[in-house]
Amino acid sequence: MLSFDLASLHAGIVDPEMDSMRILSETALRFPDALSFSSGAPYDGNHDLSALTFYIDRYIKHLRERGVPEARITRLLFQYGPVNGLIQDEVALMLKRDEDIDVPAEAIMITHGFQEAALVALRGLFTSPDDVLLAVSPAYVGIRGAARMLDIPVRGVAEGPEGLDPQTVAETARAVRAEGKRVAALYLVPDFNNPSGTVLPRAARQRLLDVAAEEDFVVLEDNPYGLFARDGESQPTLKSLDTRRRVVYLGSFAKSAFPGARLGYLVADQEVTEPSGTVRTLAQTLSKAKAMFTVGSSTLSQAVIGGYLVEHDHDLRSATRELAAVYLERLDTVLAALDEHFPAGGDHGVAWNTPRGGFFLTLTVPFTADLAAMERSARDYGVSWAPMTMFHLDGGGEREIRLGFSNLAPDAIREGIARLARFVTDASKDGATTTPKHPAPEIPEGQA
């Protein structure tokens, strides 16, 4: 009977760090009685089963109003659909209205969430073993996993209290070039980065685009949380500021609609000239990769999301204001509970940042916050969280934890922080304060 040694499989499967996403998603299943700050699952209190059929019907009505023949509508929904998707027109209108991103439908690919969008973009842009991906560090675990599966080397660029420093990005790109390699792309989440919650200021966004042009790389902008800023505090996306087509924009409907649709999109309006002289968008050209990965995205999922966009006049920002208020209430609840249990001036050794939106914040603690500590916290204290070491690309974060609050009601948040405070107190007393390999980061002025 055929069997395998783990070491005989691809490095992306063998690497224990590639278990991060699975561990985070399965923590709640392993400890069902624990209050979970370990994931970034969206709020699910607004889901309605009847809405699924409503939005599908709404999209079918929309197609009929556009004059699409009945036989074609039936084929579009029941058969394999176009590789790059059915709802590019609707997404293009949404992007123009919500983000001031003005691109043709041909520049949009509908994908199976962010993860496939990232895989497709990386596969198309990285052509040599000497091509390097720069990524904000700490970073969402999915980008490192996607790069690992494609054998793409990743170089972390440490962020500060306001996200990436463009000058540091430029210096890192030059250092890579001095090694005889090439930076092909930079990945970042400029709005409420997962896991840290940082927001890149507008001036830094503009400067980062200049650096991308000067150092000749593509920016992969991931924006799952930008809709959930406080009123009047939204920043322009990098793509909306991009006059030189340096940005490939990666979006998802997981947070704004619902994750079960497994639907995202890639915006790549860069021109690609074929040997015949034909000019197509990069999104159209990358369809070859998508066809080999997944053939096409679910037409039923697209119908639901398409109907949602049509019903809300392609104004997703307005349609999600109540949802944004839910997340902001939960953020404020976390911050207030932390202030209560770890008051300023105390000797608890705990500090945290104060993001203005998003799903996460980062807590610095006086002990080694590894998976063993997280498991003890979930098992014995009934509260789970995510070790920040999972998100750092080049080491670090040994005394930091990520708190995800998006899918916990305010009462559960208050109880969860109380449980966490008991665990932190006991972990500190128990001597779990071994010296980390990397010092804990400084907490900027104004943070608790």
Image (cartoon, grey):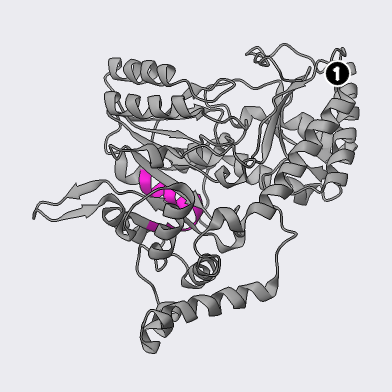
Taking 247 as reference, is 166 above or below it? above
Q: Is residue 417 left or right of residue 162?
A: right
Magenta residues, start to end: 109-121
Where is mark 1, residue-wise?
428
User: x, y (%) of residue 307?
Assistant: 52, 71
The residue drawn where x is 44% and y is 39% is 221
Q: Is residue 112 magenta?
A: yes
Residue 107 rendering spot, x and y as whole percentages = 32, 54
Q: Residue at x 57, y 26 (%)?
A: 392
Residue 367: percent from left, percent from top: 78, 19
Say which of 17 and 205 sits in front: 205
Q: Residue at x 67, y 43 (%)?
A: 23
Q: Is residue 355 visible?
A: yes
Tell me the SS state at disc 1: helix
Q: Amino acid at mark 1?
A: Ser
Badge 1 density bin: few <14, some 14–19, many ≥20, Cα 10 Å = some
Give the residue at x 42% y 47%.
100
The dominant secondary structure in magenta is: helix
Q: Is residue 293 visible?
A: no
Callout count? 1
Image location of residue 353, percent across then percent down: 69, 25
Spot the residue most to the left.
276
- Name the image quarter holding residue 67: bottom left
Q: Is residue 233 above or below residue 249?
A: above
Q: Is residue 399 magenta?
A: no
State the image quarter where residue 295 is shown: bottom left
**Which residue is at the front of the view, 431 or 267?**
267
| Quarter of the image where the C terminus is located | top right
